[in-house]
Image (spheres, coloured by chain):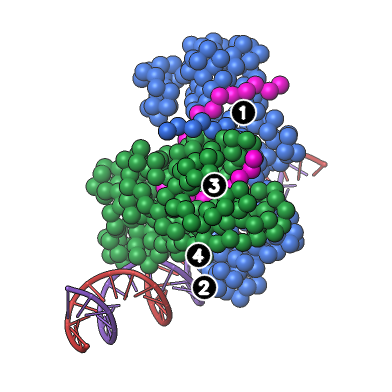
Chain colours: A blue, B green, C red, D purple
DNA sequence: TATTTTTTCTGGTAAATACCAAACCAACTT
DNA sequence: AAGTTGGTTTGGTATTTACCAGAAAAAATA
């Protein structure tokens, strides 16, 4: 199992700080030669480090050292920008698409609304220090937010809700599971199809208990770290 | 990219219910032949399904269809057994080790205690329907729980705390991130080294705000699904 | 200097092959 | 009936080879 040794060797170099976060590895063929092994075995070692979140790759671009993950607290309303800035990172968001459509199946299931309810769907790509780390897809119940498409919601939907509609998030139901990146989402994240991902699904209610939107967040799995404090209720 | 087609083909059979949860796939060589491809490409397809949580493998034993994940709520005190039973699953726990030791580095960091503080460490293996799904490692501050080693805590530590020491969990700080299974932990879970995992770290306080223990839970990544409801506090 | 085109490099995919060791099963022994 | 042994199957690991397509770099052009 020489791939284990290669893995450890690379790992040591990362931990020792010889390879800085975000820096690119030499070409696979060169690395394989350096470790006196085949390209396939070298890729095996890198893949293990990838599933451990130590390194990541960009499709046909190479392998990189993973930056430290962003702490993500699902129980507060900090938006992406705020979270990133608090952690000393540089956030950026891009709008990938936005449209007013009848609620699709998967979102209808999350929202618990009838089929054909009008929703405003939009997709955003989130960057941290110019690395694409997440694609977020929002489904907003259209009737509660007239002309939402004209507002500037790209950076923060939370902010738009509050300023333009006097709506505050008050309760959120969330699911978090591992998944893999496929198709358009993988492409937007410059990831190869099948890369490991964290999928965060949230369903949000406003201060009146009204269900207002849901979102799906596909994160590169090494880019976040779910973190929270809970006050426990004893059941029995 | 024929591995994508193979993947979809297998996936369809799973979704159609032709392959029931927990059932074993034919041997790799036979499957490869059936799909008229090489074993390597077949393994590529299965690996993708694995990272998506649709299938899992047991080391040198073969590939299996993943059962549906257990919903795990980090914000309540339901123990493993209770969670499993509520979901209609059959739980079982095995004690892998238990010892009274000076707090090791990683746990000291989580607990925020001085080095050499005595802790009671024990490892348990959790099964769902006889499938090993998680290894949990607990570090309990020994001075608060004299003779803990004599109690029957294997099924539920929570229960022992409550009945024998009148201690209730009241606040927990948790971190969740993806990781990979290695060494002993992988072996206990019958997983191959490097299999994807969910790592849940928790630090717990009792009803008096006293820090009492922490635990590390290594889950097979397809076996859980973090799920919770949060009441939000607006900051600004 | 800025833009476009061409070339080179590099990662992604795929096959064929080989050997090892653990798991499994069946036959045998006690 | 229970335990041991030995052969077979099967997944894990590793090498070699090949070709493709996208990305990056270099060269040519406007």
In the rendered structure, does residue B232 fall within the stretch colored magenta? yes
Q: Residue at x 68, y 30 (%)?
A: A81
Q: CA distance from mark 1 to mark 4?
A: 37 Å
Q: Specify the subunit that label 4 lies on.
A: B
Residue indicated by mark 4: B184
Regarding mark 3 in the picture, which secondary structure is present there? strand
**Which-is-in-front pick, marks 3 and 1?**
3
Q: Quadrant of the C terminus of chain B?
A: top right
Q: Looking at the image, do the residues carrying marks 4 and 2 touch, with CB atoms under 8 Å apart? A: no
Local crowd size for mark 3, using a 10 Å CA cut-off: few (<14), some (14–19), many (≥20): many
**Which-is-in-front pick, marks 2 and 3?**
3
Residue indicated by mark 3: B200
Q: Residue at x 49, y 32 (%)?
A: A234
Residue indicated by mark 1: A76
Q: Say the numbered circle drawn on residue A1.
A: 2
In-front residue for pair A23/D9: D9
Most frequent secondary structure within the magenta stretch: strand
Q: Is residue B17 left or right of residue A116?
A: left
- Residue range of the region highlighted in magenta in the rendering: B210-236
Q: CA distance from mark 2 to mark 3?
A: 28 Å
Local crowd size for mark 1, using a 10 Å CA cut-off: few (<14), some (14–19), many (≥20): some
Q: Percent x, y for residue B62?
A: 34, 62
Above/below status of A69 relative to A147: below
**Which-is-in-front pick, marks 1 and 2?**
1
């Amino acid at each position: 199992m020489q791939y284990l040794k290669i893995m450890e060797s690379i790992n040591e170099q990362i931990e020792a700080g010889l390879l800085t976060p975000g820096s690119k590895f030499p070409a696979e063929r060169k690395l394989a030669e350096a470790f006196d092994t085949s390209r396939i075995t070298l890729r095996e070692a890198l893949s293990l480090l990838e599933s451990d979140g130590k390194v990541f790759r960009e499709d046909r671009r190479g392998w990189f050292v993973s930056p430290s993950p962003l702490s993500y607290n699902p129980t507060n309303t900090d938006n992406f920008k705020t979270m990133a800035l608090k952690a000393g990172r540089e956030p950026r968001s891009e709008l990938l698409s936005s449209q007013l459509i009848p609620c699709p199946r998967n979102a209808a299931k999350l929202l618990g609304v009838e089929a054909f309810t009008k929703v405003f769907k939009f997709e955003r790509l989130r960057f941290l220090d110019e690395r694409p780390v997440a694609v977020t897809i929002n489904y907003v119940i259209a009737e509660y937010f007239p002309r939402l498409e004209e507002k500037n919601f790209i950076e923060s939907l939370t902010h738009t809700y509050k300023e333009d509609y006097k709506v505050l998030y008050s309760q959120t139901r969330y699911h978090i599971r591992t998944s893999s990146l496929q198709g358009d989402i993988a492409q937007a994240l410059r990831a190869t199809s099948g890369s490991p991902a964290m999928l965060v699904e949230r369903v949000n209610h406003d201060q009146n208990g009204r269900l207002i939107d849901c979102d799906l967040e596909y994160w590169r799995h090494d880019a976040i770290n779910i973190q929270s404090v809970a006050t426990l209720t004893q059941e029995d």
